[in-house]
């Protein structure tokens, strides 16, 4: 242990207590917020969430889904697109290359569901370094309706997917979105991915929205097409290397808010290797650091392990150690309770997954500050510039 004066040890304990309190508060806010329907939420006039949805009843919707490659759950997630319980909607699938292996599966599904208007757009439009945005541009342009959902290929849409998105729309909304919720992990590191996505990232996103600091999430985004066109259209989302960061800034600049669905949608995970979890989390962390550095900086304190262990090393007393053990049990217990409350994945390995996640967090945070290179869609890129120009190292298999 590190020997500190009593005042230093007390200061360390006080700082740790603040971090524990803030994180427990965020867990409580998320537990209250997630799963509530619009009229059941709090009565914050700034969010006007006590009012019913402002979405026009029965308005037709265009669903744009960029696709690339076959994934473990591609058949299931694609099929869900054709089984939405909504009276009038169209599907627009965007595939950048004619050789993509997803095409035969997609064409079979389109042929099997002729009653659902669907369109395939081959070939992207390179407006910047974001491959997903490049793939969506032509689909956005082709959308025939005033309400457009941009949905990633690995989102598992429930039958009332469109209704849930619409229910969150308020008069103050510029965008409604959903953070991904990890589901159906098939090995331990997929459970670690769940620990990142669910009780950490989703929790903070809902807590932020409750404070009026809603952030966009690119997995599922409901736009009013005339609104976005008035702000420069989908091409305006190229203002940042990450389209969700650009969307957040665009909506706020227009005097609107980002709202979240009452219950976020699942992303089936299947099998995950540690290298995949690390690569994905580092990429997202570096993007957050570049686009919102002031919000990213405090992320060093959002995991329990680092503050509790460091405080234990400097406090150096039995009483302090017992307090820290109790605080850790309360913190992780609250995360498990949130998962239970929200109906998210839980298992006997959940605590171990939470501990591994928190052990990785400081290294991910440090890596985000140390480098600006990311690997995205098989391309090594430098995110210091808006366009995210590819590095000289070229394509990568990661």
Image (cartoon, rainbow, N blue to C red):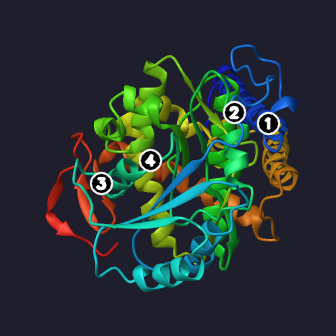
Quarter holding the C terminus is bottom left
User: Reading the chain from its start, which is encountered first: label 4 or label 2?
Assistant: 2
Alpha carbon separation for disc pair 4 and 3: 22 Å
Instruction: Categorize mark 4 by other alpha carbons within 10 Å: few (<14), some (14-19), many (20+).
Output: many
As drawn, the residue found furthest toward the front would be 115
The local secondary structure at tag 1 comes to helix
Percent position of residue 284, x then y: 44, 51
Residue at mark 2 = 207
Determine whether 153 is above or below 339 in the image. Answer: below
Instruction: Say how many tags the image has.
Output: 4
Q: Residue 104 sits in which quadrant?
A: bottom left
Alpha carbon separation for disc pair 3 and 1: 34 Å
Residue at mark 3 = 134
User: Reading the chain from its start, which is encountered first: label 1 or label 4?
Assistant: 1
Label number found at residue 33: 1
**What residue lies at 70% left-to-right and 55% top-to-bottom?**
87
Instruction: Categorize mark 2 by other alpha carbons within 10 Å: few (<14), some (14-19), many (20+).
Output: many
The local secondary structure at tag 3 comes to helix
Tell which tag, 2 or 1, sits nearer the viewer: 1
**What residue lies at 59% left-to-right and 77% top-to-bottom?**
73
Residue at mark 4 = 285
Percent position of residue 315, x then y: 70, 35
The local secondary structure at tag 4 comes to helix
Q: Are marks 2 and 1 in contact (CB under 8 Å)?
A: yes
Instruction: Categorize mark 3 by other alpha carbons within 10 Å: few (<14), some (14-19), many (20+).
Output: many
User: Reading the chain from its start, which is encountered first: label 2 or label 3?
Assistant: 3
């Amino acid at each position: 242990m590190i020997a500190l004066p009593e005042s230093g040890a007390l200061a360390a304990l006080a700082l740790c207590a603040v971090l524990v309190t803030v994180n427990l508060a965020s867990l409580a806010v998320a537990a209250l917020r997630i799963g509530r329907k619009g009229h059941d939420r709090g009565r914050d006039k700034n969010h006007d969430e006590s009012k019913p949805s402002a979405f026009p009843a029965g308005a037709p919707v265009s669903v744009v889904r960029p696709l690339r490659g076959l994934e473990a759950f591609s058949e299931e997630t694609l099929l869900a697109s054709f089984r939405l319980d909504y009276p009038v909607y169209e599907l627009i699938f965007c595939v950048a290359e004619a050789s993509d292996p997803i095409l035969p599966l997609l064409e079979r599904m389109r042929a099997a569901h002729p009653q659902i208007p669907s369109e395939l757009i081959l070939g992207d439009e390179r407006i910047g370094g974001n491959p997903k945005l490049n793939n969506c541009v032509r689909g956005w342009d082709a959308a025939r309706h005033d309400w457009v959902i941009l949905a990633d290929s690995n989102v598992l849409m429930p039958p009332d997917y469109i209704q849930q998105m619409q229910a969150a729309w308020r008069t103050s909304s510029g965008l409604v979105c959903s953070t991904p919720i990890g589901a159906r992990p098939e090995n331990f590191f997929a459970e670690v991915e769940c620990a990142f996505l669910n009780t950490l990232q989703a929790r903070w996103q809902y807590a932020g929205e409750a404070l009026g600091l809603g952030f966009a999430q690119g997995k599922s985004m409901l736009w009013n097409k005339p609104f976005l066109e008035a702000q420069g259209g989908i091409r305006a989302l190229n203002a940042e290397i990450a389209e969700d960061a650009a969307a957040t800034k665009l909506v706020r600049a227009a005097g609107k808010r980002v709202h979240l669905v009452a219950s976020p949608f699942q992303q089936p995970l299947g099998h995950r290797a540690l290298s995949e979890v690390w690569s994905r989390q580092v990429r997202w962390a570096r993007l957050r650091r570049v686009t919102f550095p002031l919000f990213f900086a405090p992320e060093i304190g959002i995991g329990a392990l680092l503050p509790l262990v460091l405080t234990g090393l400097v406090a150096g007393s039995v009483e302090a150690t017992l307090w820290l053990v109790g605080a850790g049990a309360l913190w992780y217990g609250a995360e498990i309770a949130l998962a239970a409350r929200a109906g998210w994945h839980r298992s006997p390995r959940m605590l171990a997954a939470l501990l591994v996640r928190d052990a990785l967090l400081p290294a991910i945070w440090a890596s985000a500050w140390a480098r600006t290179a990311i690997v995205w869609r098989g391309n090594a890129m430098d995110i210091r510039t808006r366009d995210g120009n590819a590095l000289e190292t070229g394509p990568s298999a990661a």
